[in-house]
Structures are given as C-alpha cells and as structure tokens.
Amino acid sequence: MMMKKREQGEAVSELQQHLAPRLYRSTGVGWDKLWEQGVTPWGLGRPTPVVAHLHKSGGLPKGRALVPGCGTGYDVVEIACPDRHVTGLDISHNAINEALQLFSSLPNAMHFTFLKVDFFTWHPTDLFDLVFDYTFFCAIEPDMRSAWAQKMADSLKPYGELITLMFPIDDHVGGPPYKVSVSDYEEVLHPMGFKATSILDNDLAVKPRKGREKLGRWKRSASRSSL
C-alpha cells in the first residue's frame, strides 16, 4: 500500500540517514539494512501503473528485458510473458530474497529471473531488447550517471529501447533519491548515442508522484552496443 504523504516523507528522511556514508550506499550494505527494516519509500507494493499499461496495450518490445534496481520485482513479474523474458537486478540480498519468496511459484516464473548483483560490475552474456529504469537513476550518486549511461548503451541490442520513468522531478536538496530533470538524462545519454523518441508527462503516476514524473523512451545507434 502506498504510504501517506507524511509517512513517506519520514521514510525518505530515515532512508537518507541510513545511507549517509557514501560507502554504505555503494556497497549494498545500507540498502540491505533498509529492506530489513522495511524503510523502502520508493516501493509501490504493486506494478508501476504506466508499465502495466504499456505491457497490456502491447507497447513494450518483446525479447529480453532488464530492470536494474528492481527491488522486490513487481515490474519484472508484471511484464514477463512468453514473448519477453525479464531479468531483475538488485544490489540488496534482502530485496532479491523477498522477490523470490513472493513470485517464484507464479505460473509465469519461467519467464523472469532475479539476480543479486551490482549493475555497474555485472556482465550479461546476452544483450537486451529493453531496459526499464524507475527509481534507479535517482538512487545512484549523480557523479555515477555517466557510468549508468555507458552501462545502458553496453547492455542494449542494436536499436534496443531504454525506457526511463524520470522521478523525482523537483528542486529538493540531497538524496537519495536525488532530484532529476530531463536535461540530466540528456546530458549523459546523448554522448552514448541515445536520442529520445518521446518524453511525456506520466498521467498514470500514483497520486503522491503526480506532476513529478515523465516517461522517456530512448533509442541509440546500432554501433554503440557491446558486451
């Protein structure tokens, strides 16, 4: 269930206190502690509405999909189907364990995989047709965003698609979550050959996030991908 606005603000403050030392944020130790204590204000406890809509309306690429920073994996499971195998990654052991406990016995379990890995050091054996990012870009250090973009370029097949649900678009200070803007994405994605095919307000955003989300869809030139 989505937290009330005040409760969510308190949880974000607690999140930032837990992750204050940078080493704690980057190693996964701090994230594990947050999952253990249930301090996960980024989680909706259900699939992201706009992703569910895109899946049900046939608006997502088929093939292999990747969801970095997947948490408990609601979006992974939502879009997994016979035409699309989805891999969910998270640096938190507790998050991945919870995802497996929740979903490993579902009828579509053969169509998704959960891995406890660091997205930035992980090397997939095959490229992806789709990567979906939501509350991952805003969770990493801003000085890691160029590395994020490089990894996206390296992970996608030629003409693969990157979908970014940009959040939080506001002027708050500090993080995580760190504030984002369309220009923040463009600044790191354009040098990697990505160009936006569309950037729209997310009309299906959950109420506490309305007006602070945009859905970006990006493609890049075939020459940029590599394993």
Image (cartoon, helix red, strand yellow):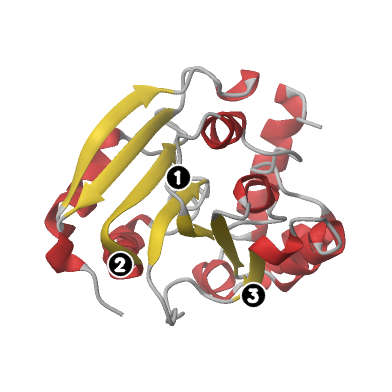
Q: Which comes before the other along the chain, label 1 or label 3?
A: 3
Q: Which residue is mark 1?
A: 178
Tag shown at residue 116: 3
**Amino acid marked by disc 1:** Tyr
Q: Nearer the viewer, mark 1 or mark 3?
A: 3
* Residue 30 sits above or below residue 4 on the image: below
Find residue 180 and report its horizontal and vertical position in percent: 37, 39
Q: Which is nearer the N-term, disc 3 or disc 2?
A: 3
Secondary structure of the residue carrying numbered label 3: strand
Separation of disc 3 and disc 2 at Cα?
19 Å
Assess whether mark 3 and mark 1 are in contact (beta carbons under 8 angstroms): no
Crowd around label 2: few <14 · some 14–19 · many ≥20 (10 Å): few
- Residue 146 vertical placement versus 214 (above, below): below
Residue sitting nearer the eye, 213 or 215: 215
As shown in the figure, which amino acid type bears the numbered disc 3?
Lys
* Pick the front one: 34 or 45: 45
Q: Residue at x 41, y 54 (%)?
A: 130
Residue picked out by circle 2: 147
